[in-house]
Image (cartoon, rainbow, N blue to C red):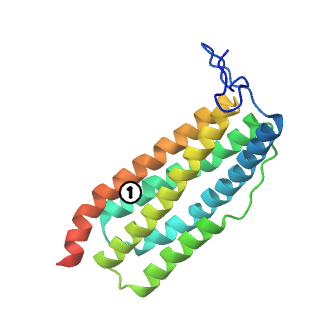
């Protein structure tokens, strides 16, 4: 068995084994954090199902409208997927107001209000949308890690699906933004 060089005590990893000794209080705390953050992203995804249609109404570029419409469909699927994750974890479906997403949506609304309809507004909507995507990528990535560490593999697989969809949405927005940003400066 490997020893911790600082204390002479056995390390948390046994030599040749992938098992990790865990602190039950830490596991319980991580589980509570997973559950809280899952409630947070559930609220966030539901809020986005209301915010994205307003963005779509304000864009002028067909490619951006298509990208946002496609992601609205994905977001609706993600709401259902989070409900599946609650079930996989044996939790009641519940939401917790997400201050971060609330702020990101408010920022998008301010961009739409402060710009004229056209490519500059479209560029602003992309910027706001990508901030949302980055928040979701960070959240789903963290939740995936927590679920994996806790041995909640069904939940981890579902979280990974959403993580990959958010990365794809971000890449799509980047691709659309290239032409829009060039047009916005002309």
Residue plotted at (39% across, 68% down): 127
Q: How many marks?
A: 1
- Which of 158 and 150 lies nearest the eye of the viewer? 150
Write down the quadrant of residue 118 in the picture.
bottom left
Is 2 on the left or on the right of 9, as rendered? left
- Percent coordinates x, y for residue 75 in the rendering: 54, 52
- Is the residue marked by circle 1 packed among few (<14), some (14-19), or many (20+) residues within 10 Å? some
Left or right side of 98 for 26: right
Q: Secondary structure at mark 1?
A: helix
Please state the horizontal and vertical placement of residue 123, each as a whole percent of the image: 33, 71
Which sits in the foreground, 70 or 166? 166
Question: What x and y, as percent, mark residue 28?
Answer: 81, 40
Please give left or right for residue 90 compared with residue 11 in the image: right
Q: Is residue 14 above or below residue 107?
A: above
- Circle 1 residue: 67
Q: Position of residue 12 (x, y in %)?
A: 69, 27
Residue drawn where x is 43% and y is 47% of the image: 167
Q: Quadrant of the C terminus?
A: bottom left
Q: Quadrant of residue 67?
A: bottom left
In the rendered structure, the answer to whether residue 38 lies left or right of residue 105 reads right
Q: Quadrant of the N terminus?
A: top right
In the image, residue 105 above or below residue 158: below
Report the residue at 51% width, 76% height from top: 107
């Amino acid at each position: 068995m490997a020893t911790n060089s600082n204390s002479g005590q056995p390390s948390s990893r046994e030599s040749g084994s992938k098992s990790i000794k865990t602190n039950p209080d830490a596991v319980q705390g991580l589980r509570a954090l997973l559950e809280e953050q899952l409630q947070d992203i559930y609220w966030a995804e539901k809020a986005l199902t209301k915010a994205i249609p307003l963005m779509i109404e304000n864009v002028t570029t067909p490619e951006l409208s298509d990208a946002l419409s496609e992601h609205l469909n994905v977001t609706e699927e993600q709401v259902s997927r989070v409900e599946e994750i609650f079930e996989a974890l044996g939790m009641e479906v519940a939401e917790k107001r997400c201050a971060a997403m609330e702020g990101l949506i408010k920022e998008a609304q301010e961009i739409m209000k402060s710009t004229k309809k056209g490519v500059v507004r479209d560029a602003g909507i992309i910027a706001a949308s990508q901030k949302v995507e980055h928040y979701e990528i960070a959240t789903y990535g963290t939740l995936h890690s927590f679920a994996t560490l806790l041995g909640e593999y069904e939940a981890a697989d579902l979280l990974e699906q959403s993580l990959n969809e958010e990365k794809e949405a971000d890449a799509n927005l980047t691709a659309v933004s290239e032409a829009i940003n060039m047009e916005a400066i002309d």
